[in-house]
């Protein structure tokens, strides 16, 4: 049986790439298809596979500004030739789920989220405050509306959807009209573990620096609370955030896993100020015995136990977040309880569940959708 793995783009090791990494381990002979591949940006376990990139790879500045080619993504993903494959597994938050598969093949989609900016987060990415009124209204809005229609119209190309959380499953039902099985993303709970170090008084963010993460809110709230903040990660919002931040905010940029683990162990708490589809960072932090302060919406409701492994705040406002920062400093921290909670999201459990769903999917006749 020939297997193809399809992923939106390979430009770094984030949550989606960690799911792909497990798929690569499960299916070592599989070929990987992607819109764009920056060599060396993902783990050796992914890089050792045959990786086939779309024509987006050859366009000017695609490695650093690939999002400008968003209108071309539908055409690019439909050009992949998958005729020789019997099983296609897409890892999708944008266009990967819309590949065209042969009639005999099964297509299982691990959906990290329906296309955020096309459905319910347009303003965060392309609203007037970010793109200007003219471009937002007359360029981006028509393009994204067309993408949303294409995204919904191509959902029947998937035979079975797998969501990374109940929150994403509800969005798949809302936008695609399809049910989804739920398999939480994998977390390396063996690597992320507590150590005998005393946490400091600072807070921590580990995140891509993109609009929906609401890192601007976290910076403003930490400034109001008079606490220090360390930020791990990079992204298109970095310049704007650095201009907003004062001397109590430290930008560390992208760092290795060992330093991230050390940051978790030394932080007072990790902050998630935006609504997450699932959120691997809070699970990694809890596995290290570090509590989490998170907006009480989306995936955080499935990963953080309020008052026990962290603090949930209700509204995405500075007042609400400052109150949560104050509460977490008085919370009784029990690292062993946090680690026990995080263990349910281990790589082993994730891989076992994926294997089960693939076996079930292959048992159905070709073309069956559910």
Image (spheres, grey):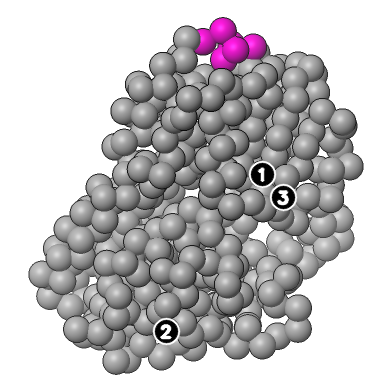
Whether residue 276 is visible: no
Q: Residues within 10 Å of mark 3 (few under 14, many from 20)?
A: some
Residue stretch rendered in magenta on the structure: 326-331
Quadrant position of residue 49: bottom left
Instruction: Pick whichever, 194 or 117, lies toward us.
Output: 194
What secondary structure predominates along the stretch shown in magenta?
helix
Instruction: Pick whichever, 155 or 238, lies toward us.
Output: 238
Residue located 78% across and 37% down the image: 250
Residue located 82% across and 28% down the image: 248
Residue 25 rendering spot, x and y as whole percentages = 31, 67
Which quarter of the rendered picture does the N terminus lie within? bottom left
- Label 2 – label 3 distance at C-alpha: 30 Å
Q: Which residue is mark 3?
A: 253
Q: From the viewer's perspective, is residue 83 above or below residue 168?
A: below
Q: Which residue is mark 2?
A: 50
Residue 359 rendering spot, x and y as whole percentages = 15, 65
Asked if the residue under mark 3 is in contact with the one under mark 1, i.e. CB atoms within 8 Å, the reply is: yes
Residue 274 rendering spot, x and y as whole percentages = 61, 37
Q: From the viewer's perspective, is residue 287 above or below residue 2?
A: above
As helix, strand or loop, the secondary structure at mark 1 comes to strand
């Amino acid at each position: 049986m020939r297997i193809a793995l399809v992923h939106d783009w390979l430009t770094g090791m984030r949550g989606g790439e960690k799911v792909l990494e497990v798929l690569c381990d499960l299916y070592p002979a599989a070929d990987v298809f992607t819109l764009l591949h920056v060599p060396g940006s993902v783990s050796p376990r992914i890089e050792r596979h045959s990786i086939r990139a779309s024509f987006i790879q050859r366009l000017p500045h695609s490695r650093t500004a690939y999002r400008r080619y968003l209108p071309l993504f539908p055409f690019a993903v439909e050009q992949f030739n998958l005729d020789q494959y019997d099983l296609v597994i897409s890892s999708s938050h944008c266009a990967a789920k819309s590949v065209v598969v042969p009639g005999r093949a099964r297509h299982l989609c691990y959906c990290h989220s329906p296309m955020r900016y096309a459905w319910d987060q347009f303003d965060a990415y392309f609203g007037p405050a970010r793109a200007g009124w003219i471009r937002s209204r007359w360029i981006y809005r028509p393009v994204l509306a067309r993408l949303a229609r294409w995204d919904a119209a191509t959902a029947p190309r998937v035979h079975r959807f797998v969501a990374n959380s109940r929150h994403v499953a509800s969005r798949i039902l809302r936008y695609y009209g399809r049910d989804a099985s739920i398999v939480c993303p994998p977390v390396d709970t063996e690597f992320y573990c507590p150590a005998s170090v005393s946490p400091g008084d600072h807070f921590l963010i580990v995140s891509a620096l993109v609009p929906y993460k609401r890192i601007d809110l976290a910076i403003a709230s930490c400034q109001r609370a008079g606490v220090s903040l360390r930020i791990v990660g990079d992204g298109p919002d970095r310049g704007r955030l650095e201009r907003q931040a004062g001397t109590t905010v430290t930008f560390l940029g992208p760092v290795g896993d060992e330093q991230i683990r050390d940051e978790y162990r030394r932080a007072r708490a990790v902050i998630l100020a935006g609504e997450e589809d699932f959120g691997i960072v809070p699970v990694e932090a809890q596995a290290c015995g570090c509590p989490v302060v998170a907006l009480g919406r989306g995936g955080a409701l499935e990963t953080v136990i309020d008052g026990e492994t962290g603090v949930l705040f209700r509204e995405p406002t500075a007042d609400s977040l400052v109150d949560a920062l104050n509460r977490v400093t008085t919370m009784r921290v029990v690292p062993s309880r946090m680690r026990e909670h995080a263990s349910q999201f281990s790589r082993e459990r994730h891989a076992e569940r994926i294997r089960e769903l693939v076996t079930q999917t292959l048992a159905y006749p070709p073309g069956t959708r559910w």
